[in-house]
């Protein structure tokens, strides 16, 4: 019998592994880049050429916004698979950060062609980085480590520190010197994040260094070959459509591309979950957990469809329907994008403490998701009366964002943690990619809602969003116990 004591857990970063600090700051700067860009994106697209904007219609800008933000998260599925099967999570995060930086600098150029190229590079880069950096966080803890949910809440604070400062800095710079200089602040942030990731990567130990290798080499090669073919076919299809559209062979509108993406998201989701639930390549427990992931997936997609309107319909509401004058100074509409992350920074430690303090009485993941949807519904319900008048007080939006933040803290860090616990070791990046596929659908829905800003009465638009989220919360409440059974021992 081996009486050697187990090594003491690493507690060098606020009671958590030191590697969490590396990932905390990597994601902080990546989110600084992403949210700095997002805060300006829709406003930049609808601004006139005379003011340095692109002069898109609101409907067209909403379609592009939804397409970009949806693809950012959709590409985490192949990004997670590439890391799992080929390069490992560590290199995937590095390569993704490099591509994001290149895309940011393309936006600085102020050219329409480079604008689209920059969005494309950022989509691919975020697809490689986003899911895999979260997977690395999970790998810092053993399956029995009770600090995992708390660690993800701390990690989530890093996300929101970056998201808080970037709209303030980028919005002020864009307002004073022009859009392209606002985008430059996002580019600088990603470069800083990459630099610290390389310099402090040693604290991650062996996490994410190697791709998964199957015990069946023949099956392993076949899966890699089939996956690579599918990935290359998808890239080729995108290139062909882009070339045909740019040469005028295909008459493609922004709205048509957005609609195609919606169908693609539905088909991809159906194929992925059909394979996970019915394929014999997964064990019985894994297939049960896939059913639970599917329930949480639908709930998350609906929640993000309301939450991510912060960058679309609510962003336009802040710009056009809100009185932004304070002591004679009109602050940039992009500054509203800092409200949510500021609230997360304040309340994330409270929620991290709360889940630990509740002990055995801590709600299950499905119960927390139900609360998230309920608060998401209330956030838009209070916007219905605000949308009936002219210019309104900023407190309406701030109240909306507060309720959304409470919902976010019930759902998002909990979802990240649940995916790392429900995922088989061989498919950690892939399952995390599926989690972000829900965000992809939500962002597409948010873009669609933003495109209706001028064509649908705002009280109706906000009322529909509130009603759908509330109905989803009721349905999920009825499914809490069955979903917990499907999670096969994972809380």
Image: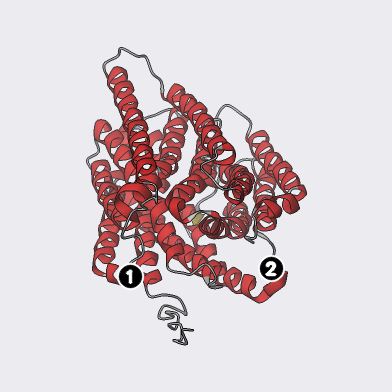
- Residue 161 visible? The answer is no
Q: Which residue is mark 2?
A: 362
Q: In the current view of this chain or complex, which residue is farthest to the top? A: 249
The quadrant of the rendering that contains the C terminus is bottom right
Residue 165 occupies quadrant: bottom left
Judging from the image, what secondary structure is the residue with disc 2 in? Answer: loop
Q: Position of residue 326 (x, y in %)?
A: 50, 58
Q: Is residue 436 above or below residue 222?
A: below
- Side (left or right) of 205 relative to 195: right
Label 2 Cα neighbours within 10 Å, binned few <14 / some 14-19 / many ≥20? some
Q: Which residue is mark 1?
A: 205
Q: Of 212 and 256, which appears nearest the observer?
A: 212
- Side (left or right) of 476 relative to 106: right
Q: Is residue 219 above or below residue 92?
A: above
- Side (left or right) of 164 relative to 200: right
At horizontal 42% and vertical 79% (from top left) the residue drawn is: 10
Q: In the current view of this chain or complex, which residue is farthest to the front? A: 1
Q: Position of residue 34 (x, y in %)?
A: 38, 50
- Residue 287 visible? The answer is yes
Q: Of 334 and 232, which appears nearest the observer?
A: 232
Disc number for residue 85: none
Q: Of 294 and 358, which appears nearest the observer?
A: 294
Q: Position of residue 40 (x, y in %)?
A: 39, 45
Number of marks drawn: 2
At horizontal 46% and vertical 56% (from top left) the residue drawn is: 425
Return the disc, 2 or 1, that comes first in the chain's sequence.
1
Compute the Cα span from label 2 to label 1.
31 Å
Label 1 Cα neighbours within 10 Å, binned few <14 / some 14-19 / many ≥20? few
Q: Of 368 and 232, which appears nearest the observer?
A: 232
Task: Look at discs 2 and 1 and give the one toward the viewer.
Answer: 1
């Amino acid at each position: 019998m081996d009486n050697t004591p187990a090594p003491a857990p690493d507690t060098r970063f606020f009671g958590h592994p030191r590697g969490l600090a590396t990932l905390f700051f990597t994601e902080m700067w990546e989110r600084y880049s992403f949210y700095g860009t997002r805060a300006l994106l829709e406003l930049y697209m609808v601004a006139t050429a005379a003011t340095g904007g692109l002069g898109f219609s609101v409907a067209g800008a909403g379609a592009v916004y939804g397409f970009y933000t949806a693809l950012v998260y959709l590409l985490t599925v192949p990004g997670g698979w590439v890391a799992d099967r080929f390069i490992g999570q560590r290199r995937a995060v590095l390569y993704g950060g490099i591509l994001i930086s290149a895309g940011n600098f393309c936006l600085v150029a102020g050219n329409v062609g480079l604008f689209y190229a920059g969005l494309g590079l950022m989509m691919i880069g975020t697809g490689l980085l986003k899911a895999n950096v979260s997977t690395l966080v999970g790998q810092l803890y053993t399956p029995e480590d009770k600090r995992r949910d708390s660690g993800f809440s701390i990690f989530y604070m890093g996300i929101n520190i970056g998201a808080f400062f970037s709209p303030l800095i980028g919005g002020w710079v864009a307002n004073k010197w022009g859009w392209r200089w606002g985008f430059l602040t996002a580019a600088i942030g990603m470069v800083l994040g990459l630099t610290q990731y390389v310099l402090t990567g040693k604290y991650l130990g062996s996490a994410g260094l190697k791709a998964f290798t199957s015990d069946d080499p023949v099956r392993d090669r076949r899966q890699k070959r089939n996956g690579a073919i599918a990935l290359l076919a998808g890239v080729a299809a995108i290139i062909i459509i882009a070339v045909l559209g740019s040469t005028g062979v295909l008459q493609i509108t922004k709205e048509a591309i957005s609609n195609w993406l919606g169908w693609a998201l539905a088909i991809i989701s159906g194929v992925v979950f059909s394979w996970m639930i019915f394929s014999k390549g997964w064990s019985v427990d894994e297939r049960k957990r896939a059913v639970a992931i599917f329930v949480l997936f639908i709930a998350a997609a609906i929640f993000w469809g309301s939450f991510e309107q912060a960058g679309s319909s609510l962003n336009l509401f802040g710009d056009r329907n809100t009185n932004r004058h304070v002591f004679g100074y009109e602050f940039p509409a992009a500054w509203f994008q800092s409200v949510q992350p500021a609230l997360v920074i304040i309340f994330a430690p409270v929620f991290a403490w709360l889940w630990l303090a509740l002990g055995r009485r801590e709600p299950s993941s499905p119960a927390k998701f139900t609360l998230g949807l309920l608060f998401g519904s209330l956030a838009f319900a209070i916007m219905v009366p605000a949308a009936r008048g002219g210019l309104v007080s900023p407190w309406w939006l701030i109240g909306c964002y507060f309720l959304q933040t409470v919902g976010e803290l019930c759902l998002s860090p909990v979802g990240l943690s649940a995916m790392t616990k429900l995922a088989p070791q061989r498919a950690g990046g892939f399952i995390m990619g599926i989690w972000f596929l829900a965000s992809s659908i939500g962002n597409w829905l948010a873009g669609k809602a933003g495109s209706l800003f001028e064509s649908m009465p705002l009280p109706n638009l906000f009322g529909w969003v509130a009603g759908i989220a509330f109905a989803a919360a009721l349905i999920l409440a009825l499914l809490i116990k069955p979903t917990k059974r499907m999670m096969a021992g994972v809380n």
